[in-house]
Image: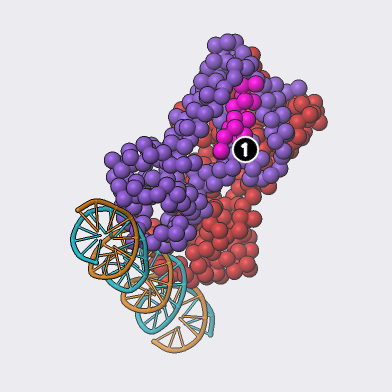
Chain colours: A purple, B red, C orange, D cyan
Amino acid sequence: MALDENVIVDLVKRRIVTDTFRRLPADKKERVYRTAINLFGKFGYDGLAIDQLCRQAGISKGSFFQYFPSKTHLLEFAILVFDDYLGGWVAEIRRNERVVLARDRILYLYQALVVNTKLFSDQQRFYLFINNALNHAGVSLEGLDLERHFQGYVNEIIHRGVQTGEIRADYEVDLTGHLVSMIIGALLNREYRDRKMTRHQTEEYLVSFLFDGIKA
Amino acid sequence: MALDENVIVDLVKRRIVTDTFRRLPADKKERVYRTAINLFGKFGYDGLAIDQLCRQAGISKGSFFQYFPSKTHLLEFAILVFDDYLGGWVAEIRRNERVVLARDRILYLYQALVVNTKLFSDQQRFYLFINNALNHAGVSLEGLDLERHFQGYVNEIIHRGVQTGEIRADYEVDLTGHLVSMIIGALLNREYRDRKMTRHQTEEYLVSFLFDGIKA
DNA sequence: ATCATATATGACTATTTGGTCATATCGCGA
DNA sequence: TCGCGATATGACCAAATAGTCATATATGAT
């Protein structure tokens, strides 16, 4: 969760945040970041009022504009820091990866997704952020490429499964990866947002649904 | 697409639109509705400027506030009319339903979803509307219950499949329905938004993915 | 033609909000 | 203590925008 200094340095170079912001104590930077994610997620880009952000993050409006050139830059900052976080999170899953059968690989993917990382607690916040804040036309979404991070890894898992013969060879890897990602997303949604199923149910269904199909 | 008079009458009773609006010529009402869906979808609730809506729908601002008590009511109006449209659309699918095997049922669902109805051309617009406009806190979303319409029907299909033995009996109907809906949504998204696959591929994958599972 | 009622209109208001700036305060070296 | 660069602050400004209202125009019955 701590903001990576290297990322901030890069953002300064690209004039997305100021050097003044970079020099700020870490906890202040983090407060601004968390508040931005939360408020963008709750109210969308237009809905976030800078006055409220400042009040909530404990800074003054004058200071805000010494940290960020504009509101748009705040969004870009939040997107890019979040993107970096996503990347690190997938890297951690990758590091912990065990060599298992295809069936367990998918299950592992799911477990890693929700248990092994901080995303567990952050999921709701980030889910809202992605859904509500990222449609602002003024900011290119190139910075946040979910596919590049998570789905790239899913595809890799599936690709290996195909090569070892554990997964059908006639599936296109990236389409299957897309579907698996979407299904995991659907399950997460069901589990966290609707609270209609338990973790155990989720895992049971994920495996049987993906590997056994609908037919008996 | 034509606005149903009965729905409008109900909206008048609930003070969501005025009687003046009800008496308007149909094409004017429709212009306002379409413009609202488009702009809410493009810019979200806060992003929609009433001035722009008026310009685009060809009415004056003064008139607007003789049709709707407030901007919030415009959103509520759009939601409820859209909800009615959804209901009619599912009813049409239901009427055209053929008696088929489970495998074909799902495929039929999908085809009905994208081919047999106007949703084909409206999909993108409504997709945006649902995603960008419905998070406005001030308006209850009770009015738009996707599950009640589409997923209720999906569940019915699956339930019948289970009863005839075409679908595994150990699946919970509503969870399976949820997953099927999500997968269809994912495929639609892939097909329309990303333009990464053809209709034929979609159908192939839908069936093999749902019925054969990932494993060879 | 007249009158009454319903509808159309855009200037105007009050408020919100992104962004500025002059001033104050802090941190720190000498 | 003094001085200087960096940071903090909130009053202020200009633009945008939801909503109002007085006036104009259309409609339709007699």
Rendered location of residue A92, percent (x, y)? 52, 28
Q: In the rendered structure, the residue with mark 1 lies on which chain?
A: A
Name the quadrant of the C terminus of chain B: top right
* B179 left or right, relative to A56: right
In the image, residue B5 above or below residue B113: below
On the question of residue B96 being in view, the answer is no
Stretch in magenta: A104-119
Taking the image as shown, residue B203 lies to the left or right of residue B166, namely left
Residue visible at 59% across and 30% down in the picture: A112
Q: Regarding mark 1 in the picture, which secondary structure is present there?
A: helix
Residue A98, quarter of picture: top right
The residue shown at (69%, 33%) is A202
Amino acid under disc 1: Leu
Total numbered circles: 1
Pick the front one: B70 or B86: B70
From the image, tell me which residue sits under label 1. Answer: A188
Q: Residue at x 43, y 36 (%)?
A: A84
Camera-nearest residue between B107 and A144: A144
At a point 75% along the width and 36% down the height, the residue shown is B173
Give the x, y percent position of residue A77: 38, 45
Q: Establish if A30 lies above or below B107.
A: below
Q: Position of residue A48 (x, y in %)?
A: 45, 57
Q: Nearer the viewer, residue A30 or C25?
A: C25
Q: Nearer the viewer, residue D20 or A3?
A: A3
